[in-house]
Image (cartoon, rainbow, N blue to C red):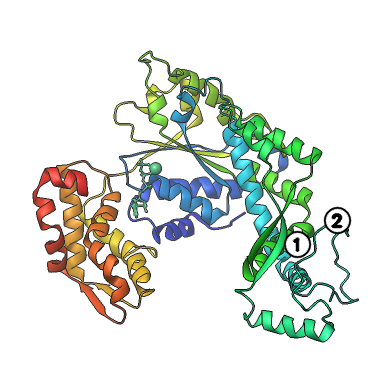
Amino acid sequence: MSSLTPREIVSELDKFVVGQAEAKRMVAIAMRNRWRRQKLDPDLREEIAPKNIIMMGPTGVGKTEIARRLAKLAKSPFHKVEATKFTEVGYVGRDVESMIRDLMEIGVTMVRSEEREKVRVRAEKHAEDRLLDLLLPGSTPQSYSFTPMPDPAAPQAPATGLATANESTREKFRQLWREGKLDERMVELEIAGQDGAAMSIMAIPGMEDMGGQMQDVLGRMFPQKKRLRKMKVKDAFNALVQEESDKLIDMDKVQDIAKERVEQTGIIFLDELDKVASKQDHGGPDVSREGVQRDLLPVVEGCVVNTKYGMIRTDHILFIAAGAFHYAKPSDLIPELQGRFPLRVELSALGQEEFYRILTEPQNALTVQYSALLGTEGVTLTFADDALREIAAMAQKINEDTENIGARRLYTLMEKILADLSFEASDKGGQHVVVDRDYVRERLADIVENRDLSRYIL
Ligand SMILES: Nc1ncnc2c1ncn2[C@@H]1O[C@H](COP(=O)(O)OP(=O)(O)OP(=O)(O)O)[C@@H](O)[C@H]1O
Ligand SMILES: [Mg+2]
């Protein structure tokens, strides 16, 4: 578990999210509290429930971004789910517990890839040997004992005219492969394919979870069919590394670690909570909103959910809820749920100044992204400061004139400003393009002035 202090967490978040200091502080505390809890006596530890958070604020101001970054920082399994999803027709009775199953799935994937990374060197060695077997059938050296189950029925790789290759040829090939000279060659490789039968079960609405479990059972009953596929040596190698690392890692251990991590550090981001908050139902075919809240309650309060990896306790999973809360207020939630989300924070709408900072400060700022993208074409793209000021001002203006979509406005603006350049960049290798205020104005003038036009284009 990450041992960053709240101050450190906030400063990490600052690298990606501009402003919203209060929200950052709050999630930092929530994260640190988990670390503190781990230090306690087991008895007391069990008693301490996470303090779930509600983030309120208009669209595009960083709610999701903060939660996502926090999870990344903490290496927590993170799952985002819309509360409204459970009100949809066709999902009647669909249990909200599926979000825990999804979270566990994410946890397992996360831990498995970490474990794969640990055995990577060994897996690559095995994969390389198997690759050479494919390229030079019959050249398997004595020392190579990692032969998969011999299967006389398995089709041999096509004769390459090198069937008599001896060990020294093998070593030469190894050298060639390591130098990347064989990357583009084609080989045939047998790999596990999709299980068609189980896939069709997945398609029945409301039965996805059962589908998952059935798939598991079916998978055990009928081992996965292998398919022969032609592919480039490079891709074959990657597929082999996957297969070999899966042989080397202990899936039981992966599941245990994942379970622990999900239960102790998992984060569920419950979006659009405000949409299920209002008290009156408007009738219609939707599942009642209060019903959804009632369904959510046990999961948020702590219960045991049966997943295909075993029972998962939800007591210590952190829930971060979000919503605009323009009409409904947190006090419109059923009381039991209100108590389960004791921390509330409001995120402020973003203005010109914030937009300017969003364009310049974050490590992954849009300006950095576009410069890097066009850099691949050999175009050097730089933004003059006055251009960024101009974009920020326009973003603010258009948000006011049409609809306030927060920082997302910057995406639509930038795309419009750079549309021509993006199209032509391939022919402009070696050039240096400076985007300044005039450049921006030129490309946006007509649109910004025309409200109707900006509704459609920006
Ligand atoms: N304060 C901010 N600093 C940096 N980038 C931001 C900020 N706010 C939003 N963004 C950028 O805008 C985009 C949308 O933000 P985000 O997904 O967090 O919005 P949201 O608040 O969750 O909105 P919604 O209610 O629509 O889900 C993201 O790509 C994010 O990087
Ligand atoms: Mg969001």
As displayed, is residue 338 above or below residue 392?
A: above
Quickly name the residue at label 1: 244
For label 1, count other residues whose C-alpha is less than 10 Å away and answer few (under 14), some (14-19) or many (20+): many
| Residue hosting label 2 | 153
- Give how far apart the Cα atoms at labels 1 and 2 are: 21 Å
Q: Is residue 400 above or below residue 432?
A: above
**Nearest to the observer: residue 311 or residue 140:** 140
Quadrant of res 445: bottom left
Measured along the vertical axis of the image, is residue 298 above or below residue 118? above
Residue 285 in sight in this render = yes
Which amino acid lies under the numbered mark 1 shown in the image of this protein? Glu
Element carrying mark 1 = helix
Name the residue nearer the viewer: 6 or 74. 74
- The kind of residue tagged 2 is Ala
The residue at the point 24 percent across, 75 percent down is 433
Report the number of numbered marks: 2
Of label 1 and label 2, which has the lower sequence position? 2
Give left or right: position of 201 versus 444: right
Q: Is residue 311 visible?
A: no
Within 10 Å of disc 2 (Cα), the crowding (few <14, some 14-19, many 20+) is few
